[in-house]
Amino acid sequence: MPDDKPGKETAKLHKAYAATNTDELAEAYDDWADEYEDHMKSIGYTHPAMVTSMASRHIAAGSGPILDAGCGTGIMSEIMQALGHEHIVGLDASPGMLKVAAEKAHYKALHHLYLGEPLDFDTDAFAGVVSSGVFTQGHAPLDGLDELIRVTKPGGRLCFSVARTYLEGLFDPKRRELEDAGLWRHVDETGIYNSAPLGDHLPSRVYCFEVC
């Protein structure tokens, strides 16, 4: 299905992609929160499984607090807890999504924060970061990676998905900038996959980097 002709299941996703500021993004997800998981299941949404699979290979259970950056309704918290991570902290731009995430009771704390802005966490606060479906069109800017690095302790791993919009010419320069600055090193990455195989065509890749 072409990206410019979304089905009804992905119409709200494309509305979120069209956001031009954080207020519009939060409003789109607030409106979507109660239906979000049902809609994403119907399109075979693969980001959470791909990101947590990467995390299971590179972030050891019991290594310390894990930040779920852009946690949405908390889908990844269920998987991460099943993998042995007991101390999970979430942040998201949408109060509506955070409300649904809180009902799952897997998080030690939830915060209404925006990636791309300063995060209200201490430096080196987390043993690792997971982030699913966040670095994409209309969502978090790639500069949000700087703060995720700051709040992750040296040796900690960042596992996150990057969508087509950023893969095409934008992510590689940012990746090299952070490597050249000695802030992280590449650990692993997946091949290209479709993050919505039953409803859309959204090529993506998951990366893992270690904080230096």
Image: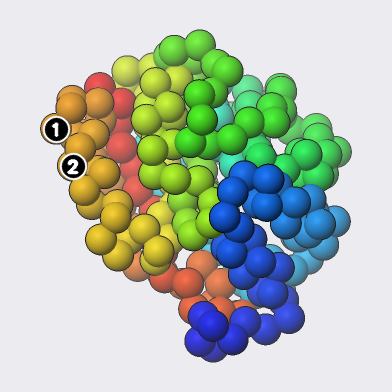
Q: What residue type is labelled 2?
A: Arg
Given residues 63 and 114, the one toward you in this image is 114
Residue drawn at the location 39% of the way across and 44% of the way down: 142
Given residues 137 and 153, the one toward you in this image is 137
Q: Mark 1 points at which residue?
A: 180
Residue drawn at the location 69% of the way across and 74% of the way down: 11
Which disc, if any, is residue 6? none
Q: How far apart are the alpha carbons under marks 2 and 1?
A: 6 Å
Q: How is the image coloured?
A: rainbow
Instruction: Give the quarter of the image for residue 193.
Output: bottom left
Q: Is residue 93 left or right of residue 63?
A: right
Q: How many numbered marks, from 0 up?
A: 2
Q: Residue 128, percent across and down?
A: 45, 28
Given residues 102 and 123, the one toward you in this image is 123
Q: Mark 2 points at which residue?
A: 176
Q: Is residue 211 left or right of residue 104?
A: left
Q: In the displayed structure, would residue 112 be above or below residue 193?
A: above
